[in-house]
Amino acid sequence: SGGKKRKRGGGGAPPCLARVAQVVEDEVVQYVTPFIERHITATDWRRREAATLAFGSILEGPSPKALQPYMADALNLMIRLMRDASVQVKDTAAWTIGRVCEHHILAITAEQWQQMTRALQPGEPPEAEGVLLAGLKDEPRVAANVCSALHNLAEHCEETRNNPTNVLSPLFVDLARALLACTERPDAGERNLRVSAYEALNTTLTNAAEDTKAHIAQLLPVIAGRLEQSFAMQIVSNDDREAQNELQGLLCGTLQVVTQKLGQLDREMADRLMQLFLQVFGSKNSTVQEEALMAVGAVANAVESEFEKYMPHFRPFLCLGLNNYEEHQVCAVAVGVVGDICRALEVKVLPYCEEILQLLLRNLQNPALNRNVKPPILSCFGDIALAVGGNFEAYLQVTMSMLEQAGMTAMDVSNPDLVDYLGQLREGIFEAYTGVLQGLRADNKGPKFTPYLQGAMRLLHQVAESCGHDHVSDDLCRAAVGVVGDLAMTVGPEFTRIAKQEPHKSYLKVLLKEARQSPNEMTQQVGSWATRTVSQ
């Protein structure tokens, strides 16, 4: 394509070849590899880049077995091409290594990992550094693709992040240091590089193993310091303001990840972070507010009951978030933070309950609010009820009325999107019922639920009638059966009496059987527990 720009994800030959590989799978390899072998070492950079791009494009679709004869040599060539004289070739080689990390990470040998991620030691020549770490200092387009490769590497460690150690552990300090340096590059605003570097850093932090926590703790004051410095940025244009908003959003996101990973904060650091986040809320940018809200939720989870001292200062911003129905992502995050605060403060959240509940009820009744925010709002009622226990009695009538009304929502079952939404809505209602029932039971106020028993039973009946169709997900079945068990434990004899009568007896039997026969072990356990509880 000469000097013309070409997007790998847009139109043209490369994405077309990638789609062919996804459809044809193993068969594509025999047709593409001769082209790669012929041009990968050509003197013309365009041919080298085309061959590199062709290899990267067939990595999704063909099986590891079909690619195995070529993988070791091809990856060695990609590593070599990361030092190519052509920026275009280096850029595409970095993208291809990212694709290998995404789709064939097990094919990478220990020696190749060393060649890609080895940190430069004092006195060594620059070429001794791993090509990915060196690539983070290259042209922004190359560095951005290296960030994607490191992100893909870290993604594969999700299942081992709670282990004592994992493959990220020996690389962690050097990777974190290199990515942090990359975010500070003067040209990090180009090619979305700063965003890509922070995303790679956050994934690395999230999926790092237990043995990296001491290093992660050392990052906390560094990132907090960067956020402090961001308020001193000189703002003389809209572009400056946007750059500040982007940076503050990224830093809040990293602080959230670090706080979540550490699981606890000392008092001094918690104070410092909350002071910074409260300052960030002065921004009118919705993305920054989202990130700051999530970061506050992480602080609440980390400091638990000590979060009480921050509530008078945070309350106005939480309410602003809950009120922001026009930017529904902000509203949804604020709803999630209410749940975090309820779990952290428990009964100490009571002084703020009435205002929060009123805002949640108003959102449910607001037709302008994106419907996807409504199931989490319903679930949030359960979080509040569980936190305040028997004190929720004061809000019982209005909450139960709203849950019953939500339970009557009907959808066109021929529309899969609406069926999914109805399932999420019902799941949210059941989670609310669970929180209310367990909260009342904790303070020996179970009988207070009796007037609302029929509404809960109606919804259970509706869900049971849908069992056997595709309309009932495993999550919905588990939530419904959990409510059956909680009704038996909380309402007691009154529920047991009704459960033995028709039609209740038949549809409860269907629901409980569905749960016990679920392929999901957790659903089976809840089904068995509810069955025992009802029969006692």
Image: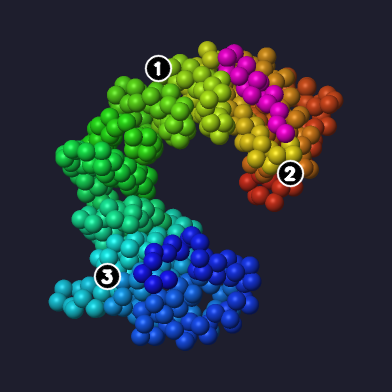
- Assign a secondary structure to mark 1: helix
Mark number for residue 470? 2
On screen, residue 466 versus residue 292, left or right, reads: right
Q: Which residue is mark 3?
A: 134
x, y (%) of residue 293? 37, 34
x, y (%) of residue 527? 70, 40
Please state which amino acid type lies under the numbered disc 1: Pro
Quarter of the image for the C terminus: give it: top right
Q: Residue at x 22, y 72 (%)?
A: 120
Identify which residue, 213 or 41, lies in the foreground. 41
Q: Residue at x 44, y 55 (%)?
A: 162
Camera-near label (1 vs 3) is 3
Estimate the spatial distance between the alpha carbons at disc 1 and disc 3, rounded to whole Å. 54 Å
Quarter of the image for the N terminus: give it: bottom left
Please rate how many residues cluster around mark 3, counting C-alpha atoms within 10 Å: few if below 14, some from 14 to 19, many from 20. Answer: many
Q: Which residues are magenta?
A: 396-412
Q: Which residue is mark 1?
A: 351
- Mark sitting earlier along the chain (2/3): 3
* Membership of 435 in magenta stretch: no
Mark number for residue 112? none
Q: Magenta residues: mostly which secondary structure?
A: helix
